[in-house]
Amino acid sequence: MIQAVRGTKDILPEISYKWQIVEEKIREQTSRFCFQEIRVPIFEKTEVFSRGIGENTDVVGKEMYTFLDRGNESITLRPEGTASVVRAVIENSLIQQNPISRLWYLGPFFRYERPQKGRLRQFHQFGAECLGSNLPESDIEIINLATSCIESLGINDYNLIINSLGNENSRLNYRNSLVEYLNDNKNKLSEDSQKRLDTNPLRVLDSKSKEDQEVIKNAPIILDYLDEESNEHFNTVKEMLSNINIKYSINPKLVRGLDYYSHTVFEFQHQALGAQDSFGGGGRYNGLFEQLGGKSTPAVGFAMGLERILLILDEINALPVQDSFADVFVITSNTNIVALASKISNELRKTGLKVLYDVLRRSMKAQMREANRVLAKYCIILGEEELKNNKVIIKNLKNSEQVDCLIENVTDFFKNNR
Ligand code: HAM
């Protein structure tokens, strides 16, 4: 037997209905916020991500699915959506046509990580990007859209953690102080963090290792290094969040794993997830357009992991059990009347009903069992005796009531009994 690749998962019918519920809510919320869908390719030239996300991040350094295609071009399966969206916005001159773009996307992403609960190698993200504004109200629209999606799904006990990484200047000053502090404590740091100290010192703050935590506890914090512009931006974001009653806490050590962030960064956490407690995150990325060869354009966005959202929804029992997927099951008493079953099914389907008939030519008893298994609301029995009078039996499977009905009146019956 050939098995699926480690870290990938089949989404079987008994689960896919949950995905559809979540996706529908997302479509509803994004449309209320007037965000439009963008569908970008699943693979890109590798430099989109290496230049966009940063060579020294875990994602680019260790986790990308990169290969040479048959034309010897280095291709990467997208590990995230932001860099691809920015590439597409630059290439299609969207900002030239309209100074602001509000875009969302949903689909599979790929990271070569160690699989565990809530962590896969092919996972799914829903994300949104607001491109073209440097003003805090665009940060707010993004966070507001994210929280509206989360809450529309029935998830209320989540935590929103925010921080500011400031502008480039503030970040540079902070980085220098942090490196100095970490260097003074280098021998107390884990091996991993010692390496990161040279390549990506801010990421040391993310370390979960106990020895690192001891050092991080007393490390300088970025909020003390924000200049006036950065402070003003962050203060307005906080004020506006409070104004629209979005609860948040500040974690000055939240840096996120991708290099493109500046100013506001945020993450959504839920205790149902255990170690992988973050189910979404994002922030402002004012330098990414230039990084990818475009004109300097401020932007802000977020993405959420759908597998993690579904884990939370299962944990808090927020999704309904699977509804019936057939309204009507047409039961045939012998093989000669399969064509009639097909005809009646089609007539009813045209009225919007979900209709099924047996394609295995099973016994009537087996067909009835199947009708119950698929939770059909009604069955139509094409019995030999009734057909002699151009009639069928319509049985309500909820209360077992049944009536005879002329074939020509079947559609009307269901119009009156929805
Ligand atoms: P990220 O934090 O790397 O951000 O990913 C966002 C979410 O994707 C995570 O919170 C998590 O739920 C999910 N995720 C990431 N990796 C995995 C995995 N291996 N298995 C399952 N779920 C995973 C970004 O990707 C940024 N592009 C977000 C953004 C948009 N920033 C600005 N705009």
Image (cartoon, rainbow, N blue to C red):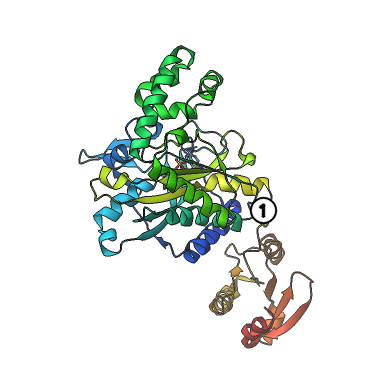
The image shows residue 214 at horizontal and vertical percentages of: 55, 20
Residue at 69%, 70% (x, y): give it: 377
The image shows residue 285 at horizontal and vertical percentages of: 37, 45
Q: Is residue 24 above or below residue 166?
A: below
The secondary structure type at the circle numbered 1 is loop
Residue 64 seen: no
Q: Residue at the far front: name it.
A: 228
Residue 197 found in image quarter: top left
Residue at 57%, 59% (x, y): give it: 21
Residue 196 or 125: which is nearer the viewer?
A: 196
Residue 399 seen: yes
Q: Residues within 10 Å of mark 1 (few under 14, many from 20)?
A: few
Residue 70 found in image quarter: top left
| Type of the residue with mark 1 | Ala
Q: Is residue 133 above or below residue 62?
A: below
Q: Is mark 1 within 8 Å of ligand 1?
A: no
Residue at 68%, 56% (x, y): give it: 321
> Label 1: which residue?
318
Residue 14 or 312: which is nearer the viewer?
A: 312
- Image-based side of 393 in relation to 158, left or right: right
Q: Residue at the far top: name it.
A: 187
Residue 202 or 190: which is nearer the viewer?
A: 202
The image shows residue 231 at horizontal and vertical percentages of: 44, 43
- Image-based side of 288 in relation to 232, left or right: left
In which quadrant of the rendered image does the C terminus lie?
bottom right
The image shows residue 388 at horizontal and vertical percentages of: 68, 85
Q: Is residue 318 above or below residue 392?
A: above
Residue 351 found in image quarter: bottom right
Residue at 34%, 30% (x, y): give it: 56
